[in-house]
Amino acid sequence: MYTPHLHEETNLGVLHALVRAHPLGTWATLGDGELLVNHVPFYLDAARGPYGTLLCHVARANPVWKCCSHSVDSVVSFQGAAAYISPSWYASKSLHGKVVPTWNYAVVHAHGIPVIVEDPVQLHRHLSQLTDEQERAQRHPWSIGDAPGGFIDQMIAQVVGIEIPIARLFGKWKVSQNRSAADRLGVVAGLTARAQSPDAEMAGLVAAALDGKPAD
């Protein structure tokens, strides 16, 4: 990842916080002579290894767990906040007009060799950790124990676990560091006034899908 020093983020706590806040990772690996890319929610175990270990699961029917490379590092990308930045927000626009649009974003890239996990006890632990992490903010948190045990066993049999001990971890925070203080304040004001919400956007996608054929 191209990362100018100005945009480099190396604080491990900051990097881990982004992964936890945006756990849907884009996992890229070599397999069968091509790049394979899957979008998977990850659980970060920060205590395992110098940079932590990523845990996820995929459907057993997904061939990636059989053909992912065990000799070339996988890369998992986590996308944090991202936003289009209008040059109209910059104070310098009215001074000299030499401004252009850009895009701000924060991302983390984790590199490591995947390990396949098929043990049902380990998978149950992983699924509980992943669920508990995401349900924590709910008013009435759901847990795996709320579902019938036999049903959960059936679900576990249909997935395969992936563990990626993180060998290298990179962060890029492109957040207007190259602009003046006045321009940065303009960016803050512009973003605040725009007030876009990813939850509202997803609700719109779900509502739009109601026009299609509903699931049985």
Image: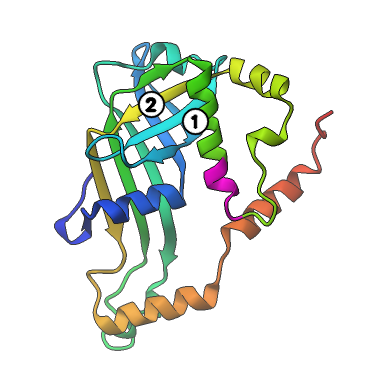
Res 160 visible: no
In the figure, is residue 203 to the left or right of 25?
right
Magenta segment: 132-137
Relative to 195, say whether 3 is above or below: above
| Amino acid tagged 1 | His
Residue drawn 55% across the image and 26% down it:
124
The front one of 210 and 15 is 15
In the figure, is residue 124 to the left or right of 66?
right
Q: Magenta span has 89?
A: no
Q: Which mark is residue 32?
A: none
Res 48 visible: yes
Relative to 169, say whether 197 is above or below: below
Numbered disc 2: secondary structure: strand
Numbered disc 1: secondary structure: helix
For marks 1 and 2, the one nearer the N-term is 1
Question: Residue 151: x percent and y percent?
Answer: 72, 22
Question: Residue 190: x percent and y percent?
Answer: 46, 77
Q: Which mark is residue 163?
A: 2
Image quadrant for the C terminus? top right
The residue at which mark 1 appears reads as 126
In the figure, is residue 210 to the left or right of 201?
right
CB within 8 Å, label 1 to label 2: no
User: Which image quarter: residue 94?
Assistant: bottom left
In the figure, is residue 121 to the left or right of 181?
right
Classify mark 2: residues with Cα within 10 Å, few (<14), some (14-19) or many (20+).
many
User: Which image quarter: residue 157?
Assistant: top right
Image quadrant for the N terminus? top left
Residue drawn 71% across the image and 47% down it:
206
| Amino acid tagged 2 | Glu
Find the distance from the CA under tag 1 to the CA under tag 2. Answer: 10 Å
Question: Residue 136: x percent and y percent?
Answer: 57, 51
